[in-house]
Image: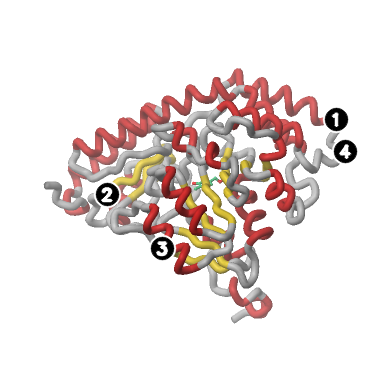
Amino acid sequence: MTEIEDLLREDLRGQSPYGAPQLDVPVQLNTNENAYAIPDDVAEVIEGYLARQTRGLNRYPDRDAVALRQDLAAYLAAHGGPGLTADHVWAANGSNEILQQLLQAFGGPGRTVLGFMPSYSMHPLLARGTGTAFVDAGREADYTLSAHYVREAIGAHDPDLVFLVSPNNPTGTALAAEVIEAAYEAARGIVVVDEAYAEFARDPGSTALHRLAGRPRLVVTRTMSKAFAFAGARVGYLAADPELVEKLLLVRLPYHLSSLTQAAARGALACAPRLQSEVDQLKHQRDRIVKHLRAKGLPVADSDANFVLVGGLADAAAVWRAMLDEGVLIRDVGLPGRLRVTAGTEEETTALLGAFETVMAARPDLFEESE
Ligand SMILES: *Cc1c(COP(=O)(O)O)cnc(C)c1O
């Protein structure tokens, strides 16, 4: 062991950082980014918002990001969260920072967060970074979660926080409302529903936003990284009871969200209806992937997100490699026989499906016999 390794916190020794490959490949469908660039008319609006901030960069930003929170609340109020105001909303550098702040405030050493893997790979890493013990309750054999399963797991582990993901990454499916309600009733702690993909759900009513009223321990986290094509800007947010939001101020860094980030996000929010048309196109491409690969005999679950989990692979790692050789980067999420593909533009999706066909024809041994 090196001297530095010796000095490192014991719980971090020998661990690896988050590392989805960032390879320079023609078709990149591996990190669930929005495939569409920001349209020119939207970019101009955002540039206007940014330009109005430049000369004031000598000053610290609004610590409490009030104007941005008002805009986010208005967006949520119009999309399944009636009655939400700036006091119910908090924003940070990506929903990853939101989740980290929730763990800093309500988790930490000696406390536990319960998750249901396979799910978002960052949840255990954020728990580790904040010294919170991550307990994985797993899922049912088909990767679904029932109210009964969730209730039992919470009863068995008595966690300080529960992380649910709906629609779930990497499986793609939204949770039934009764599962979220069961989790809330069974838990004594904070129940977080990570809704990074909410805008892509087949049923927009499946959001947990309208369950917030009367549930002060319930938190819904969202991101602008996916639906708003804003992954590079790093803007995530949550909706919760105002008292819970206030507690997060105890752990946030002062001025955590730069005035440029706040302004850019407000510009993008002003263009929400325009950006929604790209979301609709991605949903269309996602459904196209499901239909096409099913017709090829691959088991593929319906998806409420901008990605699809493809099954029926005899050797997932080899299929991943063969797809890369065809110029298409997809994601090996470590599930046996499965790979995750992000829906792209129409052209990218055509390239993805073409590459699948090429690989299936050239290497049938890499796929399971379809019935
Ligand atoms: C992509 C994703 C996020 C987004 O994280 P940001 O930090 O907002 O970019 C959050 N949760 C899940 C489940 C995701 O897949």
Q: Is residue 9 left or right of residue 250?
A: left
The reply to whether callout 1 and callout 4 are in contact (CB within 8 Å) is no
The mark nearer the N terminus, 2 or 4, is: 4
Question: Callout 2: few (<14), some (14-19), or many (20+) C-alpha neighbours within 10 Å?
Answer: many
The mark nearer the N terminus, 2 or 3, is: 3
Instruction: Locate residue 251: give its quadrant.
Output: bottom right
How far is the residue under mark 2 from the one under mark 1?
A: 53 Å
How far is the residue under mark 2 from the one under mark 3?
A: 28 Å
The reply to whether callout 2 and callout 1 are in contact (CB within 8 Å) is no
The mark nearer the N terminus, 1 or 3, is: 1
Residue receiving disc 2:
311
What residue occupies the far left of the structure in this picture? 371
Residue, x 63% and y 79% (percent of image)?
2
Residue receiving disc 4:
58
Amino acid type, label 3:
Glu
Q: Element at badge 2? A: loop
Residue receiving disc 3:
152
Amino acid type, label 2:
Gly
Near-viewer residue (350 or 335): 335
The mark nearer the N terminus, 2 or 1, is: 1
Residue receiving disc 1:
55
Q: Element at badge 1? A: loop
- Colour pattern of the rendering: secondary structure
Residue 340, x across and y down, in percent: 37, 47
Residue, x 59% and y 81% (percent of image)?
1
Q: Element at badge 3? A: helix
The reply to whether callout 4 and callout 3 are in contact (CB within 8 Å) is no
